[in-house]
Image: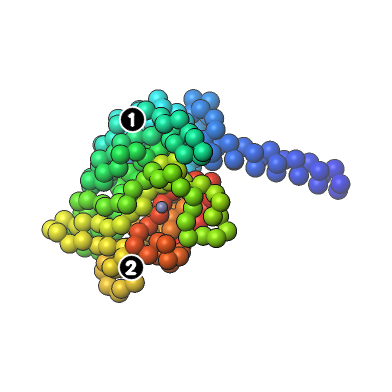
Amino acid sequence: MRRFLIRAFFASLIIGAVCLVFRQGLLPAHLTPLPRLDLENPLPLVVDWQVAELRFDRRLCRETITQSGLIKARQIPDKVRRNGCGWTNAVKMSEAGGASIGVNRVSCQAAAAVALWMQYVVQPAAQRIFGKRVVSVANYGTYSCRNIVGNSFWQDRRSEHASANAIDISSFRIEGGNTVSVLKHWRTKGKKAEFLRAVHSGACSYFRVALSPDFNAAHKDHFHFDRGILWTCK
Ligand SMILES: [Zn+2]
């Protein structure tokens, strides 16, 4: 019995380490058995690991974003990290999931997550609820050299914004001119609130952290999405 427990302990350690390596994108994609991320055909069970493989791999990033019509983006040079700030393998993005969304620098993996979210969550929700597509998405930015704000427990930790691995979404413009705003409509009732709830909960499939106004007052006017190590969907 004791030997079995020791074996089980070491087996779980090894499995945990392997999961962590995949989760953090630490192995180059050509060394893993995972099918490479195809934005047009993501594999639901492993899509989080597929997206993570874009973290350091510039070549995989270039192939992924140039071979898909779901994203318009181009790679930008790395910015050397100082004091926990800077970015590695980032892109400038202008369009995702058929809607305009402009950011000057966002990590490749976060850009891919935005494209997946737009295509498989936002556009289907807009079609279902409004019978129309989203044409543009407004954001409050991606990169900011700062610590986490609005959370006393994590206040000394760098935000994922400090590595351009996060995006703050503020509103959506629907075909025909209607705007859906996180600040104005999150706490209302009706179609716009239903849309916001749907796109927030759906973001949890592609981002590790998806925070809404329900998380704390610092997020009253935007959704915060990131691809960091934590896992929160609220
Ligand atoms: Zn944020």
Q: First in sequence, mark 2 or 1: give its number.
A: 1
Asked whether mark 1 lies closer than 8 Å to ligand 1, one says no
Q: Residue at x 78, y 41 (%)?
A: 7
Q: Is residue 106 left or right of residue 48?
A: left
Instruction: Classify mark 2: helix, strand or loop.
Output: loop
Q: Is residue 99 left or right of residue 209?
A: left
Q: How many marks?
A: 2
Quarter of the image for residue 184 reads bottom left
Q: Identity of the amino acid at label 2?
A: Trp
Closer to the camera, 156 or 48?
156
Report, in whole angstroms, how far the alpha carbon at label 2 lies from the one at label 1. Answer: 34 Å
Closer to the camera, 221 or 209?
221
Closer to the camera, 83 or 151?
83
Instruction: Classify mark 1: helix, strand or loop.
Output: strand
Q: Which residue is mark 2?
A: 186
Q: Which residue is mark 1?
A: 75
**Residue 188 rendering spot, x and y as whole percentages:** 30, 73
Badge 2 crowding class, 10 Å Cα cut-off, few under 14, some 14 to 19, many 20 or more, is many
Asked whether mark 2 lies closer than 8 Å to ligand 1, one says no
